[in-house]
Image (tube, helix red, strand yellow):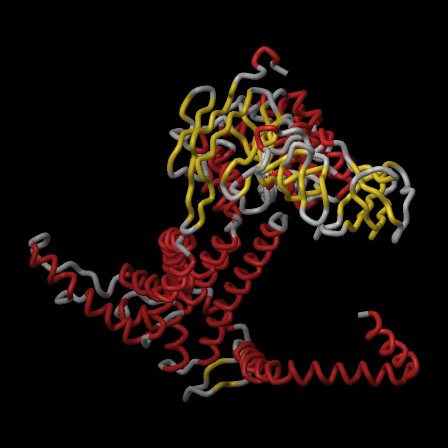
Amino acid sequence: MSDHHAGEPLVSIKSVSRRFGDVQALEQVSLEIRQGEFFALLGPSGCGKTTLLRILAGFEHPDSGSVTLDGNDLLAVPPHRRPVNLMFQSYALFPHMSVEKNIAYGLERDRVPKREIRERVDAVLATVGLTGLARRRPHQLSGGQRQRVALARAIVKRPRLLLLDEPLSALDKKVRAEMQLELKRLQHEVGITFVVVTHDQEEAMSLADRIAVMSEGRVRQVDAPVPLYERPADLFVADFIGANNLVTGVVTTEGLRVPDVGLLPCPAAPDAVGATATLAVRPERVRLGADGVLVGVVRDVTFFGGTTRVAVDVTGLDRPLLATVAGAAAVGVGDKTRVDWSGSDAVLLDRT
Amino acid sequence: MSSTLAPQRAARADVGPRGRRAARRGRLAGRLATLGPGLGYLVVFMLVPLALVLSYTLFHRGRFGGIVYEASADNFTRVADGLYLGVVWTSVKLAGLTTLLALLLGYPTAYLIARLPRRWRTVALVLVVLPFWTNFLIRTYAWIILLNSEGVINRTLTGVGVIDRPLELLYTPGAVVGGLLYAYLPLMVLPLYSAIERLDPQLREASANLGARPARTFWSVTLPLTLPGVLTGCVFVFVPSLGNFVIPELLGGGRTVMVGNLIRDQFLKARDWPFGSTLALIVIALLVLLLMAQAWAARRLSGGNRA
């Protein structure tokens, strides 16, 4: 890792907009991606993340805005001259070339000497654990192996920026977890800045140093995984990242007043008193037991092994409250229970 | 699904081996009923005439044009004569040149059509096959009007003053190739279009992303992956070009004789069916070899394309 660079912006995206017919794919998107970090663009399908990725690769051009890499205008550089490599979601391996030919392709374009190509291809094959498969054709490989070839082909040129389009989506669950660890290890090892595009929040959370959550062409929040989870900036992020209990009411000095329900614990917000706001509290922050302001009836208990998810119907709320407890639950379906959380564990959003 | 299948399976088990055999016979009958008409047509109108042609090669012409059924290899020694082999060779050269030109013209055309917005592609493809809706002879005659010494091209050129005397365009090998090219170009464009259109556009993007200029991407990715289409197109153009006798007759004016003319003359003018059959056999053998080579190459090429 090139630590002396860490923190400096490598890519700077300023007010980028792109429109396809009636669809505003990107609207005034501004982002900074730092040297050496693992950055994720996260959002539901159609949020514009893939368009942004294609702009970085040079396959799309924004209608307005600027993109710089190392301070130089990236948009003026044609795709084949950008120090940016992309790992395609479909892998896009050349079916008529062997694994080693696929990986050597980019180096041959740069007129790297034959001997060096051999050495670098061998080295990268070892890095991704495919030594011995060099002469296979793509159709003779498993999905996981193809993915590794695609990755090797993208990193062998040592790009300034590596883009990964939904890198794990085509893999089954077990290979996925394995590749997830491997991608992280690799990113540390090669020290290349990674930008991953994904709709899978767990993938983004587990891989990235920082995540930009996107929706409808806009960036909603850019943050590290933990603050993103604990302090969502708006309702969309709160709802999209993880599970959340969302309750709307009026802010008072003692808590959030919800008609027909009562006063719910919420963080002190002196400046917001009297305003309408939505309270978000994570299921794992919700306590079930003998204390608490809310009374409800257990509707459903789902055991996940390490944790149990309990859904509690509370009169006056249209959605059941979710609570995650460690181990097995002490309550059963139909039991009466009190529900509680501490005000500082909740977040107030979208105050009006 | 399983609930609907289970009773059926149970019912079949009750029928026993004899019932099962009857069922199999029923299925065979069904298959014959669907395949039968087409198969019968092929046997009666293709295999039988082909067998006749093959058998004629062993006999020779009677004095009044009939067939004398005395087996000999005379026809084959006669074919080995330089004159006839020369005509076959000329035909292969002209058909080969036509195919090459069709490829050079057809590939860019197919490529551009494949890159058009979806609704314009259909329009372009219809335009490509549009000439087929006019009678083949009429279209070929139109070429005579174009190439004639008093034709459109010559008159325009003399009119503009580029040339003093009309160029000799008609009744040349060039006119024959031009006519064949015009007639069979769509047969090159269509398979090429389908091969290029099927190619994953992300492969081109991947090539660019790895540092390849557009020309490099074409030679290293697009062309190799569309080679099966290239082969199909070449066979589609070469085969009918080789056997064509109308275009050499009309545009070659009898000066450029192709093997098709030779065969036609043996059957209709010289009334030497056995020798005509022998020439036809040679063309068929050439084409079978070509098709086998194409099938072999296509299988080899597509072996790696299933990724």
The answer to whether A329 is drawn above or below residue B159 in the figure is above
Query: Could you tell me which quadrant the N terminus of chain B lies in?
Result: bottom right
The number of numbered discs placed on residues in the rendered structure image is 0
Residue at image x 48%, y 54%? B197
User: Is B271 left, or right, of A120 in this rendering?
Assistant: left
Residue at image x 85%, y 49%? A301
**Residue B132: which quarter of the image?**
bottom left
Residue A232 is situated, as x and y percent measured from the top left of the image, at: 63, 33
Near-viewer residue (B200 or A244): A244
User: Is A319 left, or right, of A76 in this rendering?
Assistant: right
Residue A103 is situated, as x and y percent measured from the top left of the image, at: 60, 32
User: Is A74 left, or right, of B296 in this rendering?
Assistant: left
**Residue A208: which quarter of the image?**
top right
Residue A340 is situated, as x and y percent measured from the top left of the image, at: 79, 38
Residue A337 is situated, as x and y percent measured from the top left of the image, at: 86, 45
Near-viewer residue (A250 or A76): A250
Near-viewer residue (A322 or A57): A322
The answer to whether A82 is drawn above or below residue A257 in the figure is above
The answer to whether A175 is drawn above or below residue A74 in the figure is below
Residue at image x 48%, y 33%? A56
Visible in this render: residue A93? no
Visible in this render: residue B255? yes
